[in-house]
Amino acid sequence: MKKFVCRFPQPATSTPIYCGSDILHQCLPADLYGKYSSVLAVVDETVYRLHRLLLSSTLSGVRVYRFPSGERYKTHRQLFALLEWLMSNQADRRSLLIAIGGGVVTDITGLAASCYMRGIDTILIPTTLLGQIDAAIGGKTAINYKGIKNIIGSFHPPRLVVCDQHFLETLPRRSIKDGLVEAVKLFAAYDAESFARYSARIAGLIKGEGLETLVADAVRLKVEIVNRDPWEQGLRRVLNFGHTTGHAYETLTCSSHGRAIALGMLVALRLSRLHLDLSAADHDKIGEAILSIYRRYNTNRVTPQTLWQKIKHDKKCVGREISYILVDKPGSYREKPITYQQFKRAWYDTREWYSR
Ligand code: GLY
């Protein structure tokens, strides 16, 4: 089992994050709940069905809210349903709220916990690859609103995060691919060594081979980034590589998060080639790693204009500038303002490149 610690200042909080196989019971000792007035859990309904046995002791004596699976439930309606459920169960300031599920469940539960009575404790048990390497790490919470991803949210560091590999064994391939895209994003923009190591193993990772080491490496790097820039004033923005175009594409086409971010990274790579010193060889190396996860994209469903309109509403847009995270070589990123004309050219070039 590996342990990492995510630290937040003001108020000083540290979150232990445990990664390993079959570690849930070890990480949630029986006396943990004793210091809380009540314990409640929000559990993804598919996870609840598939892992009832594994969760039986974690959920023993705990009130459970079964949360519907899917991004379309990351809404203000579901947030208020959760808050009402906390009220009707007389949760108080000393209650603990546990989230068990993918990024949707950990994000929305974290947000409910951060506003309920101005903040109650949470424990996150991410059950998807994407949740384990990204969404549940770093204290962000959110819901989507009016077609904008994660536009309402907060920072609410959890008390504990447990990334148990056991949950990954039942994941469908498409869900593994969604998580792999986030791993490639992190490695390509931040850590050349991990990029070289893992980009050579993508076919095996898609089949579920070696995920435990991947999760530990990705969590280690993300914790390093968050500890250096918890409030996303600079360095943490590296994690937005591929997300500017990706979020807009995801919302407009209802594509999976992974496929949308993969396309967003391809566009960012093209922009990096056009406006930074990214070499053709490095462009193709990172691009091929992305295409080995998702090869096809339905780009006929959107135009550069509709995407740009959406991008302008993204929370990463400040004033009139659209700031893009680009890469100048594997493991090294730069932030650059991009105009519509530059985006449009990169969009069409990208389509041509991956369809060749
Ligand atoms: N998912 C991006 C971040 O945590 O900053």
Image (cartoon, rainbow, N blue to C red):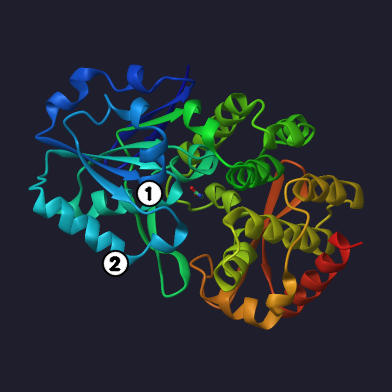
Picture quarter with the C terminus: bottom right
Q: Position of residue 247 (x, y in %)?
A: 57, 64
Binning the other alpha carbons within 10 Å of mark 1 as few (below 14), some (14 to 19) or many (20 upward) gives: many
Name the residue tied to disc 1: 105
Front-most of residues 343 and 71: 71
Whether residue 242 is visible to the viewer of this picture, yes or no, is no
Q: Between marks 2 and 1, how big is the CA–CA gap?
A: 14 Å
Q: Amino acid at mark 2?
A: Arg
Where, by quadrant of the figure, is residue 338 drawn?
bottom right
Q: Tag 2, which secondary structure?
A: helix
Task: Confirm whether residue 44 shows in the render.
Answer: yes
Q: Residue at x 43, y 42 (%)?
A: 136
Q: Residue 194's image quarter? A: top right
Residue 33 relative to residue 188: left or right: left
Dot 1: element: helix
Q: Which residue is mark 2?
A: 77
- Residue sitting nearer the eye, 265 or 352: 352
Look at 63% across and 81% down and name the residue there: 306
Q: Is residue 211 above or below residue 92?
A: above
